[in-house]
Image: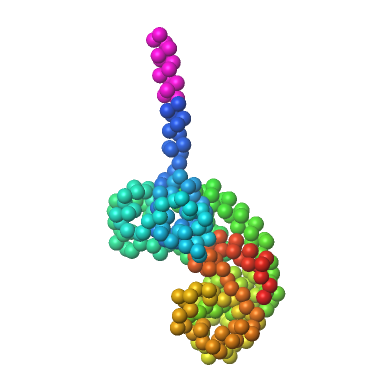
Amino acid sequence: MAPLRKILALCAIILLAFSAAPALARGPTLVSLDECADQYVLGLVERDRVLALSDHARYADSWFRDRAQGLRRVKPRLESVLALHPDMVVRTWGGDLRLIQELQRRGIKVINIDDVQSFAAARAQLFKVGDALDAEAGAQIAAHKFDEAQSQVRNIGHGRTVLYYTPTGTSAGADTLTGDMLTTLGFRLATTQKGYFPISPEALIAMKPDVFALGYYDDRYAMRRVPGRQPLVRALIQKTPHFALPDAAMACGGWFSIYALRDLSQETNP
């Protein structure tokens, strides 16, 4: 009987080791503090490592909002994050300085994700963030899908001039991700200014772009008492070929924005 007991005990140890292996191999657990960080977490990391996403993860302009279904969501508050005992916290703009310092003081690794201003930078960012999140395999898969989607973007601009315009009167230059989106679609930008900059209704009316690319024009809140509501501005846009850039591609710029651009190019012909 003694040998049998030893054999049974050995089998129990082996079974325990195998059952514990997935948990040990899971990788560091994490919490995301804002909607833009959510996209990287949802796009690159295994679900069982995600302790919580931001409270914006299911917003309409969150590209991976469907993947957030069933995952906990928290506000960027110290007590809420500490209660989950994460190994790391991921952010772009979420959480104030005090929160970040307190998390770091307690030994929690904080991953800061930078803004990107072009699709080339977005693709490079994939590998940088993937490495930081211990999600290199996810980054490789996402990069392959990015390349595939980029090759499927149709040329709908055909060299025509385009002006990006939001209800607040903001436009974008070639050194922004928005500008890169428009040139990827085959347009030429109607201005040579850099960055994001305001255009007054008077200046807009004097311009004559071939096409308007509109941002956030379906946002009722953004449309309250803004230059974009000016009757002459609306009339000019209405009589000029125009299309709307998807909110999910604009709210948080990243490699995933190419998916929205591909879909847009295949559904729109302004």
Residue 13 screen position, x and y as percent: 42, 24
Residue at the image position 59 percent from the left and 73 percent from the top = 244
* Quadrant housing residue 238: bottom right
Please give the range of residues in magenta: 1-14
Give residue 14's position: percent from left, percent from top.
45, 25
Nearest the camera: 256 or 228? 228
- 149 is higher (above) or lower (below) than 106: below
Left or right of residue 36, residue 159 in this image: right
Against 230, is 132 above or below?
above
Q: Nearer the viewer, residue 218 or 40?
A: 218
Image quarter in which the N terminus is found: top left
Q: Residue furthest right?
A: 158
- 206 vs 22, left or right, is right
Mark yes or no: residue 214 visible. Answer: yes
Q: Residue at x 33, y 64 (%)?
A: 96
Answer whether residue 235 is magenta in the image. no
Instruction: Check if residue 7 falls in the magenta segment.
Output: yes
Coloration mode: rainbow
The reply to whether residue 162 is in sight is no
Q: Nearer the viewer, residue 63 or 199?
A: 63
Q: How many marks?
A: 0
Q: Residue at x 58, y 90 (%)?
A: 206
Image quadrant occupied by the C terminus: bottom right
Q: Position of residue 114 (x, y in %)?
A: 46, 63
Q: In this view, which residue lies farthest toward the top?
A: 1
* Left or right of 235 in this view: 95: left
Q: Quadrant of residue 241?
A: bottom right
In percent of the image, x 61 and y 53: which residue is there?
144
| Location of residue 213 in the rendering, given as x and y in whole percent from the top left corner | 59, 76
Dominant SS type (magenta) = helix
